[in-house]
Image (tube, rainbow, N blue to C red):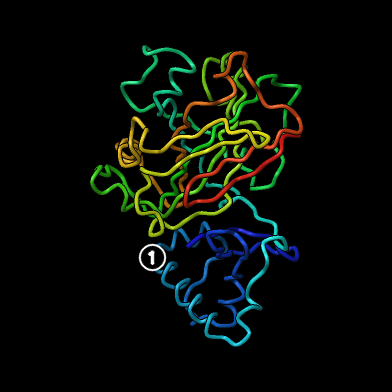
């Protein structure tokens, strides 16, 4: 299941799209006309919080739609809707893993920078934008705006002290994050938060793919293109800290909650890693793709 949050006719709705993202099933309309009277969320975030009952409801609605003679009327062509970030306003900061691909560590420094323990920083919820939205260049603040394509985890149920063995049980699904970064602010302030949290610096989407559709999240290709040029291309199997390790470490003294988002780190090929650096500029088209998840495209303005 590929869940989206969409805007159509001035209404925000929960949708379900196919893997190729050609059309969107209007789940809200399907529930209104074909639902069984059970609880229905007002947002995708609320659906994630409902857990398995939400997935069961969606499965029944999808089956009910296909049994209708006019089933086509429940679907919109993708070009008729505006996709938002799947969770347009997260409850919390987005958790991010730094330095999780060895080659990225080396392009930014040297062997001595390879972390012994997982490095975690966060991005403000106000940084989130959706697919197709514009990335603000923030020219008055930064001259070193960079991209970082990443697979992101969406947590599906509460957990604290989660074991590595049980970590994937707490996942709802996966999405894409572009961890846009102002490198000069990052260096100036000696920490990551300000350089990572500019408005519009967290493009997310286009969908959250339920975990049942991803056999092995540790074997997905992450690719970033800038103006159609491939800049990043690597498998998630190259992560130094695996997805179960990340979840387990975060939960050791902190409760993870449904809807929490964890960006798992970026592979080599970021703009700062080139000689000379190749930072983003106005008009650049950035497209991050993750195998089985989709493609996230944004333009810098």
For residue 196, above or below residue 223: above
Q: Residue at x 60, y 88 (%)?
A: 69
Residue ranking furthest to the front: 229
Front-lying residue, 127 or 78: 78
Residue neighbourhood size for the residue with mark 1, other residues' Cα within 10 Å, grouped as few (<14), some (14–19), many (≥20): some
Tell me: 10 left or right of 187.
Answer: right
Q: Where in the figure is residue 229, as x and y percent of width and height?
A: 63, 33
Image coordinates for residue 79, horizontal then vertical, percent = 71, 60
In which quarter of the view is residue 76 placed? bottom right
Residue at x 53%, y 59% (from the top left corner): 19
Q: Quadrant of the C terminus?
A: top right
Give the side of residue 278 with respect to residue 175, left or right.
Answer: right
Q: Kindly identify which residue carries mark 1.
A: 52
Where's residue 142, x and y in %? Answer: 69, 21
Disc 1 on helix, strand or loop? helix
Q: Is residue 224 above or below residue 37?
A: above
Between 180 and 17, the one lying in front of the other is: 17
- Residue sitting at x 54%, y 47%: 90
Residue 62 in the image, given as x and y percentages of width and height: 50, 75
For residue 38, above or below residue 250: below
Asked whether 135 or 220 is in front, the reply is 220
Number of dots carrying numbers = 1
Q: In this rendered view, identify the residue nearer to me: 232 or 97.
A: 232
Residue drawn at the location 43% of the way across and 45% of the way down: 153
């Amino acid at each position: 299941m590929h869940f989206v949050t969409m805007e159509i006719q001035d209404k925000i709705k929960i949708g379900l799209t196919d893997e190729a993202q050609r059309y969107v099933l209007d789940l809200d309309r399907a529930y209104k006309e074909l639902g069984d009277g059970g609880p229905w969320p007002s947002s995708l975030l609320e659906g994630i919080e409902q857990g398995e009952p939400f997935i069961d409801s969606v499965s029944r609605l999808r089956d009910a739609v296909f049994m209708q003679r006019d089933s086509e009327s429940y679907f919109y062509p993708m070009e008729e809707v505006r996709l938002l970030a799947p969770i347009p306003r997260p409850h919390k900061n987005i958790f991010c893993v730094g330095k999780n691909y060895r080659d990225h560590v080396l392009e930014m420094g040297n062997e001595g920078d390879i972390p012994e323990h997982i490095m975690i920083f966060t991005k403000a919820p106000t940084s989130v934008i959706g697919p197709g939205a514009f990335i603000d260049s923030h020219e008055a603040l930064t001259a070193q705006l960079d991209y970082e394509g990443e697979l992101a985890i969406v947590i599906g149920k509460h957990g604290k002290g989660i074991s590595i063995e049980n970590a994937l049980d707490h996942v709802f699904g996966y999405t894409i994050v572009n961890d846009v970064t102002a490198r000069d602010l990052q260096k100036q302030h000696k920490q990551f938060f300000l350089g990572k949290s500019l408005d519009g610096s967290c493009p997310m989407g286009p969908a959250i793919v339920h975990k049942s559709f991803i056999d092995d999240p540790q074997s997905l290709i992450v690719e970033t293109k800038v103006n159609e040029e491939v800049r990043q291309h690597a498998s998630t199997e190259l992560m130094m800290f695996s997805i179960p390790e990340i979840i387990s470490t975060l939960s050791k003294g902190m409760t993870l909650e449904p809807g929490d988002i964890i960006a798992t780190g970026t592979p080599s090929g970021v703009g700062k890693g080139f000689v000379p650096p190749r930072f983003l500029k106005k008009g650049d088209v950035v497209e991050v793709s993750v195998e089985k998840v989709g493609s996230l495209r944004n333009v810098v303005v």
